[in-house]
């Protein structure tokens, strides 16, 4: 079983990685200014991919920050929907998981 302190360290490390990646994405997006039409088209396609990665990274950062708040409040590992304990195996795979498997499945299926 992984301790909360270890999970917090994992979350904080991932947060640092994501912040660094988002900084790199921002720099890359700002560096594109080709005058060649073909190169500009490729740059725009690349920009769309980078923007998608940036949005995904921002969503993960938000989820990690919420998990860190739950740790601070002593609520980490409890489902935010039903209050049940989130299985350690689920937290091993997704340390910022806010929902137990049952509630996550229900939300995914629209129930």
Image: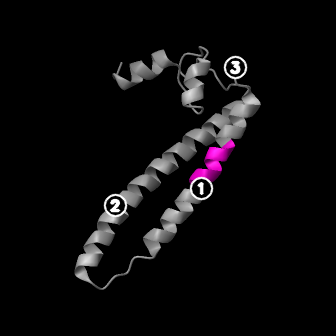
- Tally of numbered discs: 3
Residue 15 lies within the magenta run: yes
SS for callout 1 = helix
> Percent x, y for residue 41?
25, 72
Q: Is residue 66 left or right of residue 40?
A: right
- The residue under label 3 is 1
Q: Is residue 55 left or right of residue 42?
A: right
Label 2 near label 3: C-beta < 8 Å?
no
- The residue under label 1 is 19
Mark 3 to mark 2 CA distance (whole Å): 40 Å
Question: Taking 61 as reference, is 86 above or below it?
Answer: above
Of 81 and 52, the residue lying toward us: 52
Q: Residue at x 54, y 58 (%)?
A: 21
Badge number at residue 48: 2
Mark 2 to mark 1 CA distance (whole Å): 19 Å
Of pointers 3 and 2, the one earlier in the residue sequence: 3
Examine the residues drawn in magenta and state their main secondary structure: helix
Magenta segment range? 12-19
Badge number at residue 93: none
Q: Residue at x 71, y 36 (%)?
A: 8
Q: Residue at x 54, y 29 (%)?
A: 93
Of pointers 1 and 3, the one earlier in the residue sequence: 3
> Percent x, y for residue 101?
48, 18
Of 7 and 67, the residue lying toward us: 7
Residue 65 lies within the magenta run: no
Label 1 near label 2: C-beta < 8 Å?
no
């Amino acid at each position: 079983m992984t301790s909360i302190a270890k999970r917090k360290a994992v979350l904080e490390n991932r947060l640092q990685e994501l912040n660094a990646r988002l900084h790199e994405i921002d720099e890359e997006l700002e560096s594109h200014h080709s005058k060649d039409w073909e190169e500009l088209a490729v740059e725009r396609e690349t920009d769309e991919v980078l923007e998608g990665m940036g949005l995904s990274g921002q969503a993960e950062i938000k989820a990690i920050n919420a998990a860190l708040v739950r740790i601070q409040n002593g609520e980490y590992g409890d489902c935010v929907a039903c209050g049940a304990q989130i299985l350690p195996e689920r937290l091993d795979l997704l340390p910022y998981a806010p929902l137990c498997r049952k509630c996550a499945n229900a939300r995914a299926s629209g129930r």
